[in-house]
Amino acid sequence: EVQVVESGGDLVQPGGSLRLSCAASGFTVNNYYMSWVRQAAGKGLEWVSTVFDGGRTDYADSVKGRFSISRHNSKNMVYLQMNSLRPEDTAVYYCARGDSSGWGPDAFDVWGRGAMVTVS
Amino acid sequence: DIQMTQSPSSLSASVGDRVTITCRTSQTITNYLNWYQQKPGKAPNLLIYAASSLQGGVPSRFSGSGSGTDFTLTISSLQPEDFATYYCQQSSSTPYTFGLGTKLEIK
């Protein structure tokens, strides 16, 4: 079964750090672009970061310089290192898969259940 | 950044109704437009990608159309399980952006 499972969400103080993990199964993460999308309570969806299949990374301006996305191919994992956390980073963080190869949807077609990050 | 204007923000409809949600982008994105459904407490679910392609397992009552800057999601005959929030999203370029959402409620 194709799925991703997030872990690592927690309560952290402002200025603190946290690392989220995304475990993928049923597919190989380095063949897709893998992203983090967050959602604050009662709010809409906000793209946070992506690691592309070629290894390039990109970030929303709101997290640039504070967050870092990485991929561990042999473990089939994706990570989001979050530093200098702020109260406005409080949200559910989803790991999501995308496919820019042309063979699959160039969209977020597989989502995890999310990891709750609270900065307070 | 590409801005997404989704409308309406909320919509009341009845089972069996035909419903249309629109999404306009601030610059042309050809067909790099996707639609998601989200139910409370759940992750979003991909419905439509590339503006008009139905994701596998999604009922055929869902359809998408449009290109360039104007796009629509249509539900041909609402079913009870369709009451949810819907988001458009562009995958043309980063930062990937989402519409603010349309909350579809039972009339």
Image (cartoon, rainbow, N blue to C red):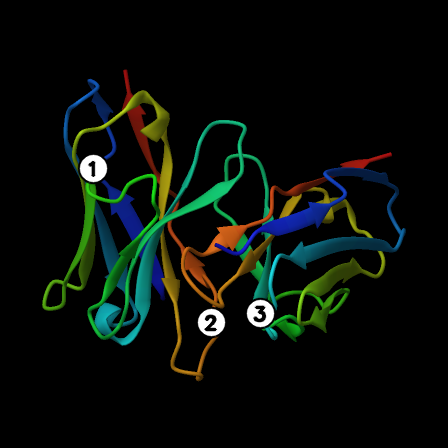
- Mark 3 chain: B
Q: Residues within 10 Å of mark 1 (few under 14, many from 20)?
A: some
Task: List x then y, in percent, for residue A111.
Answer: 41, 54
Q: Name the residue under label 2.
A: A106
In which quadrant is the C terminus of chain B drawn?
Answer: top right
Confirm whether circles 2 and 1 share one chain.
Answer: yes
Q: Earlier in the sequence, mark 2 or mark 1?
A: 1
Task: List x then y, in percent, for residue A41.
Answer: 48, 27
Numbered badge on residue A8:
1
- Mark 2 chain: A
Q: Mark 3 points at which residue?
A: B29
Seen at 77% across and 36% down, the residue is B105
Q: Is residue B31 above or below residue B3?
A: below
Task: Report helix, strand or loop for mark 1.
Answer: loop
Seen at 40% across and 60% down, the residue is B94
* Left or right position of B27 against A78: right
Task: List x then y, in percent, for residue B101.
Answer: 63, 43
Q: Mark 1 belongs to which amino acid?
A: Gly
Q: Mark 2 belongs to which amino acid?
A: Asp
Task: Report helix, strand or loop for mark 3.
Answer: loop
